[in-house]
Amino acid sequence: MTERLFEGADWDFHTLQRITDACEEVATKDLGLDVYPNQIEVITAEQMLDAYSSVGMPLFYKHWSFGKQFAFHEASYRKGLMGLAYEIVINSSPCISYLMEENTATMQTLVIAHAAFGHNHFFKNNYLFRQWTDADGILDYLDFAKKYVMSCEDRYGRIEVERTLDAAHALMSHGIDRYPGKKKLDLRAEEKRAGRRRQHEEEVFNDLWRTVPAGKSKTRSAISIERRRKLLGLPQENLLYFLEKSAPRLAPWQRELLRIVRHIAQYFYPQSQTKVMNEGTATYVHYRIMTKLHQQGRITDGNFLEFLQSHTNVVFQPEFDDPRFSGFNPYALGFAMMQDIERIVTRPEDEDREWFPDIAGKNDVMGVLRDVWANYRDESFIAQFLSPKLMRHLRMFHLHDDPEERAGIRVDAIHDERGFRRVRRELARQHDVGYIDANIEVVDVDLSGDRRLILHHHVIKGSQLNETDAKRVLQHLADLWTYDVALIEVDANDKVLREYVVSPRPISAVA
């Protein structure tokens, strides 16, 4: 008889080791997963709340916003208004999985299968994470960042450091490179270069600003548009990178802080594009591992029922007319699509052969899934693999609401071939960062005049910026630039829709 991994709800660290070994055996031998080395740590509820406040990172510099997040989550948790995650997993090598100490042995098995093998495999193999992140160097870089921020607070004062970090955090979502082609960041090498870079910056000056007239200019063509754009690398979508390289009055330590925030923002960039795939992968993997352990007799029927109850809650998808509906649950959609791909590969129907000729009937489930997990992000995954059968099962449809075309809301796509393709295209677009993130870039600097920084927001389908939020973020941008900043919203025909102009605040006012 196969030995049980545990009896009852209690566990100890020897039990966790047996569970991890059993999950690893299924993950590697049955599913063919390729993972980073695992580091599993058990934490308390308060430590989990602390992890919430620092976006799950075990090391992070100090900032007041993290304390604010901790206080908010702690108050909500104590009042029973929210629960805590069973685990948090970090994209690093070794891959760190934090498990709640309150979990039962069954739940520890579930979250180890989910995080230490499902998420871990996805982190290591998906092309976005391979292209944009450095799992080997992130922990060392965070340690460097924490120590550097602390040293800046000692030398320049907490208020000055906090002011710079506030501005950098406000611009964080616009401090990333969104498209491939740039060299992958090596965080260990970046840490080593930091000292040499600061020394160099203190010894040289920016050649661009040498060309700016010292007095009042008589002509606005002192520096040609082509030359100044070339020197500034314009247009530039990465606002933090632009400020780090070109802001005229930033001190070297402030530029390093912008660089730190920019690197951390880049590290998290793939996660925003792979929520459905990442959670779908981890949920599918934990389901396969737990099912196999039950079939092997290593967990009891009672353990398996406990697992199924939690699993069912995770993949619950409210109907569109349910008050709890707030869009598609990424766990539910991702898991359903993974299971549907398994069906198409092993038990295809004629419709599947027509829509998915490359994988229908291939009979290599894990081979197909591993290829999908490695080579797609949410937008392309949905556009390629959402099947008509699953759309019917989830009862998907598309509503059209455009007052410029027609008053009222109408159903724009139903369950026919044309409707399926429309629904799939529209759902994929909701996960396309090029469509959902504001396209803002620096386009020019008035070097021969008042040195105003000029940005454009390219509006898509009339989605303009919230005025209050736009002004608040622009204020931080102006504080870093130290001159006026103008943001112009333009449509596809370059028609100006709205313009914001913000002036920098005096340092005393900011402090």
Image (tube, helix red, strand yellow):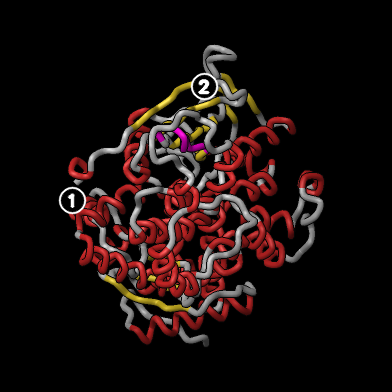
Q: In the image, 449: left or right of 36?
A: left
Per the image, label 1 sits on a secondary structure element best described as loop
Q: Nearer the viewer, residue 188 or 416?
A: 188
Residue at (30% x, 38% y) in the render: 504
Q: In the image, 372: left or right of 99?
A: right
Residue stretch rendered in magenta on the structure: 443-450
Report which residue position mark 2 lands on.
Answer: 496
Q: In the image, 286: left or right of 502?
A: right
Report which residue position mark 1 lands on.
Answer: 79
Residue at (74% x, 60% y) in the render: 346
**In the image as oriented, which residue stretches furthest toward the top?**
407
Label 1 neighbour load within 10 Å: few <14, some 14-19, many 20+: few
Query: Which secondary structure is most common in the magenta stretch?
Result: loop
Q: In the image, what residue type sits under mark 2?
A: Val
Q: Is-magenta flag for residue 485?
A: no
Q: Position of residue 288 (x, y in %)?
A: 57, 67
| Real-space Cα separation, disc 1 to disc 2, in angstroms | 49 Å
Residue at (31% x, 68% y) in the render: 148
Q: State which mark lies toward you, 1 or 2.
A: 2
Q: In the image, what residue type sits under mark 1?
A: Lys
Which picture quadrant has residue 14? bottom left
